[in-house]
Image (cartoon, helix red, strand yellow):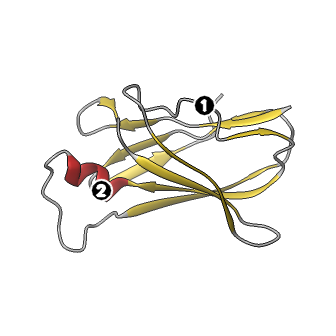
Amino acid sequence: MGRLTTHVLDTATGRPAAGLRLVLSRLDPSAAVVAEAVTNADGRVDHPLLEGAVRGRYELAFHVADYFRARGIALADPPFLDVVPVRFAIAEDRHYHVPLLISPYGYSTYRGS
């Protein structure tokens, strides 16, 4: 059975991004929110965002500006990065891991293991 997990690393501090809100939406057949979560002290969500038959197209929306503001980081108005959307597809019923590396001015993601 498939499952989806994530974690977020704040590359500006070299620490896990604790307290970052994220929203997972399924994109087809029509957009619908599947899960919402906040990262824990390790920058991870305490449970898989999806489990079971999870094939399809998805978007993870990471609310990075709110995270940085909560840590007292001065951001432009509007911020360079506000919500970072990561769109991806799950084609097989297996474990998918979508990590995010963030700073106030950049981000990176990849398919983790």
Q: Residue at x 63, y 39 (%)?
A: 111
Mark 1 nearby-residue class (10 Å; few <14, some 14–19, many ≥20): few
Q: CA distance from mark 2 to mark 1?
A: 22 Å
Residue located 84% across and 48% down the image? 91
Residue 44 is left or right of residue 30, and the answer is left
Amino acid at circle 2: Asp
Mark 2, Cα crowd under 10 Å, few <14 / some 14-19 / many 20+, is some
Res. 24 image quadrant: bottom right
Judging from the image, what secondary structure is the residue with disc 2 in?
helix
Q: Which mark is residue 47?
A: 1
Q: Quadrant of the N terminus?
A: top right
- Indicate the amino acid at tag 1: His
| Secondary structure beneath label 1 | loop
Residue drawn at x 44%, y 37% as measured from the top left: 39
Q: Quadrant of the C terminus?
A: top right
User: Where does the image place residue 16, in percent across and percent down from the top left?
Assistant: 35, 30
Place of residue 60 in the rendered image (x, y in percent of width and height, measured from the top left): 57, 54
Instruction: Reply above or below: 59 against 108.
Output: below
Question: In the rendering, at what x and y percent does residue 31 appear?
Answer: 70, 70
Rendering quarter of residue 23: bottom right
Q: Which mark is residue 66?
A: 2
The tag on residue 59 is none
**Which picture quadrant has residue 97?**
top right
